[in-house]
Image (cartoon, rainbow, N blue to C red):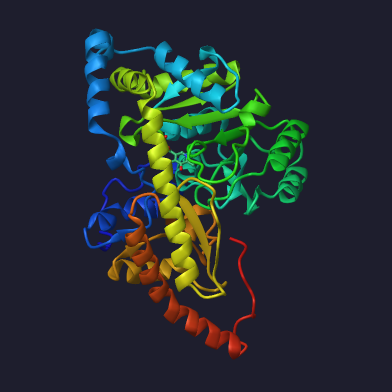
Amino acid sequence: MGTARVIFDRWDGRYAERMSGVRSSAVRDLFAAAARPDVISLSGGMPDVRRVPHEAVQRALRDALKHDGAMALQYGGSDGRFALRTTIVGLMAESGARLTEDDLIVTAGAQQGLDLLAKVFLDPGDTIICEGPTYVGALQAFSAYQPRIECVPLDEHGMRMEELEETLKRLGPRGAKFIYTIPNFQNPAGVTLSPERRRRLLELARTYDIPVVEDDPYGRLRFDGGHILPLRALDAEVIYLGTFSKIFAPGLRLGWMAAPRPILAKVLLAKQAADLCGSAFGQCVAEHYMKGTGWRRVLADLTHTYGERRDAMLAALAEHFPGDVTWTHPEGGFFVWVTLPAHLDTKALLAEAVERGVTFVPGSDFYPDGRGCNCMRLAFCYESPEQIAEGVRRLAEVCEDKLELYRAFVAAGAVPAGARATG
Ligand SMILES: Cc1ncc(COP(=O)(O)O)c(C=O)c1O
């Protein structure tokens, strides 16, 4: 990892107050280190686009220009091309959610959806509820609008409903602007919200009159177990964020937001201010790529590949990490969340890990308040099973010294034995 450069900024003091709480993400900062050929990247959640056949993309590009040439190169509607929205309606129907083209808009990735939602809902000091830990990009998007962020802890079945209820009670009716959740193969924890908890979450949201934002980039990347209905399928009031980043390619920057129409109208105004309209060209390419069944074969191959890599990671963790370290067992998606004994700081391990040729993301990045210090997120989406096994082995070596030291402290009574953060 290159050392962070300190840049003298003569405009310091002129920036808007809202930027003061926006932190850089270690994931982004690690991109340079992760690109070194000798470094095994267990940090970035990068879809393996190397497995997307270029011929299929070339065909989609050719068809886009042939059939939609002038339109593809022109400004388009702010809500996105109707044909792509029809494709999205079909995708949502497959996952169990019924809606029409008018119930959604196309966005520049789900990330833009997060930013636009924050823009239309949040005033400084407003409260929002997220899972703890949660997606670092959401924290970045939200924090620019200066909310107070309440984190509800997770366990292996997703957000814990008793804690959510306590939080809602404490805040009172309409006490939060929205509840943000990633129900499937959560980023960063890899866990999935159980069907019972999905129902309970919606009940609570209704009781306290708070909108729910469901962010679902990984829902189609399931290796084990059966499909679980999205929140949007259970309640048409839910705001749903989807993306083509994981089923096609993030380079297109295409996603969508389905929401009740009054909310969509507000979001559309914010989107017009942000970019007038999304890339018509990218939308045309996606439309053609998603025609026929080829994309389904590519996605099935990708999902199978991610599943093999998840297996490799879990096997390597079991082989190399000792009993005082725990981790989640994702049924899909990209990530495993590892919890070391409390008092160990994974941020302090990162430089040494990079030195030994492996990257991960420290757990505290996924909290707004520095919690999660003893945790780390490992991504299994990009490296081969062999590289993953080797990366985990190197990481275990890095952790082992610190674990030894920790155990010596525990033995000497200097650290409360068994103390462990919940992650
Ligand atoms: C939970 C979550 N939400 C949103 C995004 C952003 O996705 P997109 O590429 O669609 O902007 C990601 C990307 O990793 C993610 O993990």
Residue at 57% across, 22% down: 259
Q: Looking at the image, can residue 258 be seen? A: no
Q: Quadrant of residue 61?
A: top left
Instruction: Point out residue 205 in the picture as x, y percentages from the top left corner.
Output: 72, 34
Who is closer to the viewer here, 394 or 411?
Answer: 394
Q: Quadrant of the C terminus?
A: bottom right
Vertical position of residue 119 compared to residue 368: above or below:
above
Q: Is residue 69 left or right of residue 21?
A: left
Direction bottom: furthest residue: 412
Q: Quadrant of the N terminus?
A: bottom left
Vertical position of residue 163 compared to residue 354: above or below:
above
Total labels: the figure holds: 0
Who is closer to the viewer here, 122 or 420?
Answer: 420
Instruction: Point out residue 364 in the picture as x, y percentages from the top left corner.
Output: 49, 59
Instruction: Point out residue 36 in the picture as x, y percentages from the top left corner.
Output: 22, 58
Q: Is residue 392 left or right of residue 258?
A: left
